[in-house]
Each structure stands twice: as structure tokens, then as C-alpha cells.
Amino acid sequence: MKLVILDRDGVINEDSEHYIKSTTEWVPIPGSLEAIAMLNNAGYTVAVASNQSGLARGLFDIDALNRIHSRMMEQLEAVGGRIDSIVFCPHGPQDRCQCRKPAPGLLLELGHRYGVPLAGVPVIGDALRDLQAAARVGAADPGTFRQRLRHGKRASTAPCRGTRRRRPAGGGCADPRATSTR
């Protein structure tokens, strides 16, 4: 089985410092849904692991979160994609649980659910805590994953997000400052 684990906010949809609390606030990042469909078509099982501390903070309830996820799934289906599993941490940072990234609990849950070792599984996130959780389970470096997906095809030369620089022929934006400033 080929598994890839994605964070939600900032990877699939636009993030907000005020949290994503409703379906109207859930806006996909351009191209993200199509990228997930491409992963599905390449034989990947796509899972989402997301911290959702807005639940603990009382900013939204589980019904609102389920509606957000339903909207995401509907929009994915419209472009031929799917997410096979969604796991989330409902706790706040003060709860010191084992599921809130950078703790590895969400990733371990997905590894157990699918019966796969997480060594080498790509984990894609937009924050240091995502990379820390991935490192704790021995997951693959996202750069390695980009190389595998390319299969020798020419990578996009679209401008790096948030800059006027062009992508290098080898793939992603080499300069870490060339990412979005969301």
C-alpha cells in the first residue's frame, strides 16, 4: 500500500489565524484538490491528520467540523479525488495529549489503521509541528516524495508561491523564504 498523510489547514485549504470554523471559511488552496486526485490516480491512499484545537477552545463543535469535512469531500469528488481517512486532535495545546502534533499520535493511529510501518511514508504539512511529528515516526522527507512523484517528468516552472521567482527545473522552491506568508 502506498500511503501519504496530509495536514489539512494550510495544505489542502487556506489557513486562518482565526481558525476554520464553518463551511464558508473552508476555501481550498488552488490546485490542492486536483493534486489529491492525482495522488489517488497514482495509487496512493490519502489520509489527513489535523490538529483541531478550535474544538477545545469552543470555537466550533463536532457537527461543524463534520460539515467542513463533508464539504471538502464533496469538492474532492467533483474533481475525481478522495480522502480515505481523516483523523484529528480535538485538544488544545495545554492538554498535553499524545495526538496533538508535534506528538506522533495521529500518525501512529493512521499507521495502525492501515497496518503499515510509517518509515518512508510521506507526511506533508505547512508547519514545523507537522515535520516534527513525521520525524518522530520516521516518515519520509517531502522532498524525496516530490522526486518520486515526478517520475522523470519536467516539474512545473510556475512562480514560487508568494514570489516572482520561477521554480527550479528540479522541482519545488529551493528557497524556504519563497513560501506563502499566510
Image (cartoon, rainbow, N blue to C red):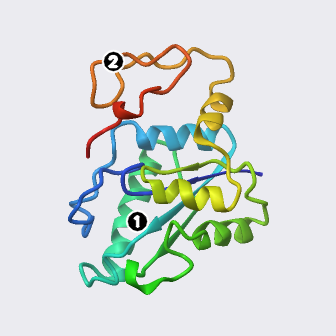
**Which mark, by number, is residue 102?**
none
Q: Of the two numbered discs 2 and 1 on the same chain, state the one appearing first in sequence.
A: 1
- Name the residue type under label 2: Arg
In percent of width and height, residue 176 lies at: 41, 34
Could you tell whether 125 is left or right of 13 in the image? right
Q: Is residue 154 above or below residue 103?
A: above
Q: Is residue 58 above or below residue 171?
A: below
Local crowd at mark 2 within 10 Å, few (<14), some, or many (≥20)? some
In percent of width and height, residue 98 lies at: 56, 79
In percent of width and height, residue 180 lies at: 31, 38
Q: Residue at x 37, y 57 (%)?
A: 9
- Name the residue type under label 1: His
Could you tell whether 78 is left or right of 44 in the image? left
Res 83 visible: no
**Which mark, by number, is residue 165?**
2
Element assignment for label 1: helix
Residue in front for this viewpoint, 6 or 132: 132
Q: Residue at x 69, y 61 (%)?
A: 137
Q: Nearer the viewer, mark 2 or mark 1?
A: 2
- C-alpha distance separating marks 2 and 1: 34 Å
Q: Residue at x 48, y 51 (%)?
A: 125
Q: Residue at x 35, y 36 (%)?
A: 179
Q: Which residue is mark 1?
A: 69
Res 15 visible: yes
Local crowd at mark 1 within 10 Å, few (<14), some, or many (≥20)? some
In percent of width and height, residue 170 lies at: 56, 18
